[in-house]
Amino acid sequence: MNIIYFLIGCSVLLALCFLIAFFWAQRSGQNDDLYTPSVRILLEGDDDVSQK
Amino acid sequence: MEHKESTQMEQSATIEKINCYHCGNECNTTDYVLDEKQFCCTGCQSVYEVLSTNQLCSYYRYNDHPGANRNSTDKRFDYLDEPDIVRELLDYSDEHINIVTFYIPHIHCSSCLWLLEQLNQINPAVHYCKVDFLKKQLNIRFDHRQLSLRQLVELLFDIGYEPLISLHDVIKNQNTANKDNLVQRIAVAGFCFGNVMLLSFPEYFGLNVYEQDFKHFFGWLNVLFGLPVVFYSGREYFRSAWQNLRNGVLNIDFPLALGIAVLFLRTLFEVATHTGAGFADTLCGLVFFLLVGKFVQKKTYHHLSFERDYRSFFPVAVSTITSDGEKPVKLSQLSVGCRIIIRNNEIIPADAILLKGNALIDLSFVTGEMLPMSKVLGEIIYAGGRQTGEAIEMEVIKPVSQSYLTQLWNNEAFSRRQDNRIRTFNEKVSKYFTIVLLVIAFGSLLFWLPTDTRRALAAFTAVLIVACPCALALSTPFTMSAALSIFDKNHFYLKNTAVVEQLARINTIVFDKTGTITLADDAKIKPELTLTEQYKQWIYSVCINSTHPLSMMICKALQGVKRLEITSYIEIPGKGILATIDRHELRMGSAQFVLNEDNSITDVTRVHAMIDEQYLGYFAVEHQYRPGLNLLPGLAQHYRLYLLSGDKDHEREKLKFFFPEPDHMLFDQLPQDKLDVIESLQCKGAKVMMLGDGLNDSGALKQSDLGVAVTDNVNNFTPGSDAILDGRSFDKLPSFLKFSKDTVKIIHASFGISLTYNLIGLSYAVTGELSPLVAAILMPLSTATIISFTSIATHVAAKNRQLT
């Protein structure tokens, strides 16, 4: 049953990784603007679409 | 010329309603055609030209008519060459690049987004641009060696996106503020909560004797997870409780902080002494839910600002005349004696004397006077007026900060912190709650102490744990945030959640007139004279030559009449028009000009007409009232209604229907008078809600218990206030007031529910036999009940008030 110590350690470590990833995302401003990307994705990146 | 005009009219009549390809307005002429596309004005056409030469016409594919009308704007950005001003506007600057953020009110659709992020195609000196759609902001990084800030702004202007530039941009401040790490704290609490729950499950189901090692291991892990929850996520509660305690206030944070501390200490004690599993699960859940409640309560309207003052209304700089020609000067550097030039549509920044030019000043925003007033040379013109017509030259007689309008800001109402506001229900209740809680806790401690010390301590801590007012602390934020989103959907934007409760306690409503109960730009002209078809043609033909707003209104009223040629035409500014048509002499204008009555009160709302010395009558300007105004008599049953107007009292009779009590209508009110009226009402015990729109109301808005700025376009300037009401929803005002009362009732009810839970918990706790499992079930259960009850009840209430 001692494997439980190891498994819990792993799970906590993994969860910590996610928490750190979230902190990083928050710090780098990825969650600052949650609306604009939803509009941006609908626009075609191609600039010569109008000529097609 | 006459012929051309009429054929053109026929043409546009036969072609059914053509809308401008750029802005979507109706085209009145067919003069502007490019690539078989119709435009309403040169402005719109030139924007299209810029875009088409840069192959950016996809702009028009994403949305129909995405542009802003460019009819009456002219570019003047020379002040952006001043290094002082540039420095204040830039976010970042080094020798290669500059970064700047602009607020662009016109951003409204995907086309805007697309075009603004393609700036690089038009000018390669722009490295990077990114739109924040909700904030209506554009962040640009550009090479300032190739493109100056002024050129950049001109580029934006050329493509139809003029930024609103102000040195006192509150929107920018919003970006830098608001860094309290709340989201991070929630993340940490959530992370710990999840892990602790996982580690607590074995305890819930019971562990065998030979698994005791695990029990201690899990216990210590739980304590470990409790540490960041208490010291990182929950730190604010301790700080706030301590601060309030020092100020002699018992607010809800005190029992919360006490609960958190006791939960942690008891957990630590139980784990260390191997006497139990502790309450780490309850602890983490409590802090997590509390923080979520805090997060929900914080609603931000990115595109609105409730803190604007005159500085964001005034321009950044003004052109002055110096010995070396015209030079833009920052407002703060404008001194007495400066000669300034004010062009069409510019705002006069400081009290000044008119030196040159025909001044026709639109003071609607300052005094509430609806029609532009003409001023004579040598007259003092107050700051805040907007010149319409040609450029004028003026001499500044008072610095900006001491001008007539800005002086209002020196009033104590603006410096005082808002402590006259009504205390919220939560604040009032939590004081008594805390006292009762402490009495019960110490009561149970003293009760058990003589017989069983251990049990006494257990009971004492259990009371503090169970009675920790989690549900109580959550009932207000969740109800209020649901209410706020209901208001938001109905175009009524509240500054924060406390405003809902203030709204419920109002008993007096004060209205401003111009722009608040009347529609700002939609005055109607009513002919009080008998007009034959021929007279109509004459008057129309004369008035069409004048750019005076009244003439334009008359022309609009007489639309469709044939235009005749006139032989002579003289317009005397501020007086009227003298013209000859078909050998008849036509006089139109003020009573003094037409009738030679030496009327000292210049009644600006009447245009008299006289043909060949024969008086015809006059055109009267009538305000259009907002559609919801007929609901006011219904409101009068529950509220005292007042009207404060900066205007003259020529509408008194008509408004009597809405404000029947004789002394409830006050006219000719200066901004300071308005503030004083509100103050005197408050002295009589009234809880005043003030609805206003202009800078002249800003004092009254600030002084009142609840200031509401009414506007037809929320992106326009609104004076500082507690709430912003979109003019379209003016008729919903009674529903808003009723709904706010419902909301308060819901808070009371949810308070009752959370108290019931507390009582159930307490009945276990006082005996000292509280098991961690009961606490762990009770806390989330009460929270879930409160959240679902408040949100469902709020939405039902909204439906009842027809606010969906």
Image: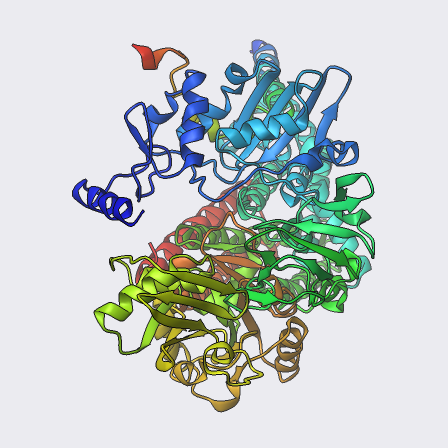
| Viewer-side residue, B318 vs B673 | B318
Q: Which quarter of the rendered picture does the C terminus of chain B lie within?
A: bottom left
Q: Tell me which colouring the rendered structure shows.
A: rainbow
| Viewer-side residue, B46 vs B717 | B46
Q: Is B27 placed above or below B405 here?
A: above
Q: How many marks?
A: 0
The picture places residue B539, in percent across and down from the top left corner, at 33, 66
Q: Is B578 placed above or below B188 here?
A: below
Q: Is B425 placed above or below B207 here?
A: below
Quarter of the image where one finds residue B497:
bottom right
| Viewer-side residue, A40 vs A5 | A40
The picture places residue B479, in percent across and down from the top left corner, at 47, 55
Residue at horizontal 67%, vertical 65%? B431
Lateral position of residue A51 relative to residue B495, left or right:
left
Residue at horizontal 36%, vertical 77%? B612
Q: Residue extending furthest bottom?
A: B662
Q: Residue extending furthest front?
A: B583
Lateral position of residue B728 relative to residue B761, left or right:
left
Lateral position of residue B249 relative to residue B637, left or right:
right
The picture places residue B691, in percent across and down from the top left corner, at 52, 67
Query: Does the rendering let one see residue B667?
Result: yes
Query: Does the rendering let one see residue B197?
Result: no
| Viewer-side residue, B477 vs B223 | B477
Quarter of the image where one finds residue A52:
top left
The picture places residue B607, in percent across and down from the top left corner, at 42, 73
